[in-house]
Each structure stands twice: as structure tokens, then as C-alpha cells.
Amino acid sequence: IVHMAQEIKDKSEKDYQEVYNAIAVKLREEDEFDGYIGYGPVLTRLAWHSSGTWDKNNNTGGSFGGTYQFQKESNDPSNKGLHNGAEFLAPIHKQFPWLSHGDLYTLGGVVAIQELQGPVIPWRPGRVDLPEDMTPDNGRLPDAVYGADYVRNFFKRLDLNDQEVVALMGAHCLGRTHLQNTGFDGPWGAASNTFTNEFFLNLLNENWKLEKNEAKNMQWNSPKGYMMLPTDHALIEDDKYMAYVKLYATNNDKFFEDFAKAFKKLLEGGITFPQSTPTYRFETLDSQGL
Ligand code: HEM
Ligand SMILES: CC(=O)Cn1cnc2ccccc21
């Protein structure tokens, strides 16, 4: 299967910046969601989950077809809680009906990262909605209970290497786990809605203890009330991953640079873009004085 992005001839950078701004203003205004964490983290996870179904071996799944809009995919147990992000974006789809669902879900993640003071994520439009029968089966997204070998093998299907995996996992600086969504809980105290390299500093500096949580799942907890999933902690159990954890803990610019590249690659997996498709680097509200 080849997913060729369509050339959007009648929309300009200004049109897409207008969509970006509509999402960003709504994100700024609706700040009370999830105990004042806001919608940034769940929008980031929605962009990742709508892309993370891709299988490079047969080019099925991925962000192109916007199939998260169909219940077969949105009801995947791996997607519990993401309906909050989809409901947040529904009015944006109404306001800009010309934007495909695939472009909507991925753009939502780009806005979230940039408005939470993360790096600029270059983004290309042209995903085309596919029919419901093209929705990938459930079970393509990762479990949190395994170790480094599982993580490395899982991301091979998404064509992502060790460095890209560690950079992407840095998004776990945002938001929190919710017992009723995934059976993991915490962090206790303020979860973050600012994109930083804290995830890597916490991994290296906290005193982690493996404990069984209220849902009978094992997770790593620290005296300060932080938590890590087994797949998070795996990054300091494996020498190759550990090298990148240390790099990103000590070099925030390098983390931002590598995260932006890896997140773009994740959001574009399986898509062939025409040479003529522009790459947009959107302004944040702050940089526009809005
Ligand atoms: C081994 C790979 C991964 C596993 C097993 C994993 C697992 C999880 C789990 C269990 C949660 C808690 C969800 C909830 O309870 O509501 C979560 C949240 C989150 N994940 Fe991941 N994740 C992985 C990779 C990623 C990647 C690659 C990104 C983005 C680049 C990402 C972004 C997020 C964000 C932003 C949240 C917070 C969501 C919220 O606060 O509602 N994760 N992840
Ligand atoms: C602060 C911190 O690293 C908390 N944290 C650690 N792993 C996480 C996975 C999903 C959401 C939040 C997570």
C-alpha cells in the first residue's frame, strides 16, 4: 500500500496557522481539565496513538487515514482516556471541515508540544481520510509492563531506533497516568504541563522502588511521589538506552532537537509526500504576541 499525501492547492501557511491558533487558544482557555493539567498531554498522546498503529512491513495503520475517528480504533483498550482529546478537537473539525482527521489529530499534538514550551515540530499536511474498513486491528500499541528488549523490538515496527525511542519517551514529562485508564497511577502532586527534559533527570536522580500498585501492576515509585512505568525504567536498565538518557538529561537543546525530528518521523510514518508539499513550522501564540 502507498499512502500518497494529497496536494492542498487552495490552503496556505496562513490557513494552517489559523487552525494552529484556534487549537492553541482553546488549549489556553480550557485550563481546568484533569486537575488543571490541561489538554496538552492528552492531545500529545492522541497524536502518538493515531500514528503508533503503523506497521512499516505492510504500510498499514498510521496517521494517514485518520481511522482513530472510527470506534473500532478509538475503543481499543490501549486508547482509554484519549476520547477527551478527540472531544476537544471535534469543534476544531467543525470550524475547519476541510482538514482531514489525520491532519487534525497530528496537528493537535504539534500544537500541544509547542504551546507547552517544547520545540517547534515541522509538520506537513495532506493526510486523506480512509474508509472504516481500513481501520487497523486493536493491539498495535505498546504495553507498559515489559523491559528494554520489548521496547526495542516494538519500535522496530515503527522504524524508530534507540536514540529516537529515548527522545520520544521524554514526552512522559507531560501529564500523568490514570488508574482507571491504564492501571497505572501517579505522579502524586503536580503533574507537569511544561515540556522539559525532567523525565531524564528524574530517571537518573530519583531513588526508584518497584512496587505493586492498587491495580496490582508493578510500577517504580520515588520518595518524592514521582513514578515510572516499567517501560520507562527500562531506559536506565539497558546500556544503549542509558547513554541517550544521560545525553538528554545534560543537554536540553539536543533533547529538543532530537525530539522534534523523532516526533515528526512518528507522525509521518507510512506517508509519501509529494515534493511540492510545504513543511510548516508554526509560530506559537506567544511568538505572535497573541
Ligand atoms: C513504550 C512506549 C510507551 C508506553 C508503554 C506508554 C504508556 C503510557 C501509559 C500507560 C500512560 C498513562 C495513560 C493514562 O493512564 O491515562 C501514558 C501517558 C502518556 N504518554 Fe505514553 N507510552 C509510551 C510512549 C509514549 C510516546 C512515544 C509518547 C509521545 C511522544 C507518549 C506520550 C504520553 C503522554 C503525553 C502521556 C500523558 C497523557 C495524559 O496525561 O493524559 N508516550 N503512556
Ligand atoms: C514526571 C514523570 O516523569 C511522570 N511520568 C513517568 N512516566 C510517565 C508516563 C506517562 C505519564 C507521566 C509519566
Image: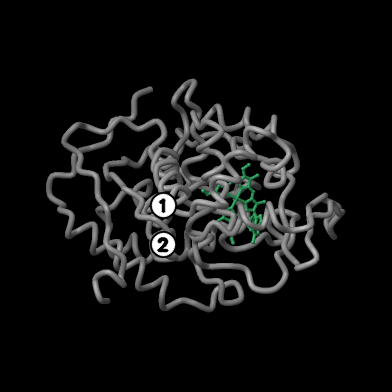
Q: Calculate the distance from the C-alpha at mark 2 to the C-alpha at mark 1.
A: 8 Å
Q: Residues within 10 Å of mark 1 (few under 14, many from 20)?
A: many
Compared with residue 133, is residue 97 higher up or lower down, i.e. above or below?
A: below
Q: Is mark 1 within 8 Å of ligand 1?
A: no
Residue at 45% of width from left, 40% of height from top? Answer: 266
Q: Amino acid at mark 1?
A: Tyr
Dot 2 or dot 1: first in sequence order is 2
Secondary structure, mark 2, is helix
Q: Which residue is mark 1?
A: 105
> Relative to residue 92, is residue 182 drawn left or right?
right
Q: For the N terminus, which image quadrant?
A: top left
Residue 202 location (% of width, % of height): 66, 57
Q: Which residue is mark 2?
A: 89
> Relative to residue 257, is residue 236 drawn left or right?
right
> Relative to residue 33, is residue 8 drawn left or right?
left
**Location of ligand 2 given as a quarter of the image:** bottom right
Disc 2 to disc 1: CB gap under 8 Å? yes
**Front position in the image: 98 or 36:** 36
Q: Amino acid at mark 2?
A: Leu
Secondary structure, mark 1, is helix
Compared with residue 15, is residue 64 higher up or lower down, i.e. above or below?
A: above
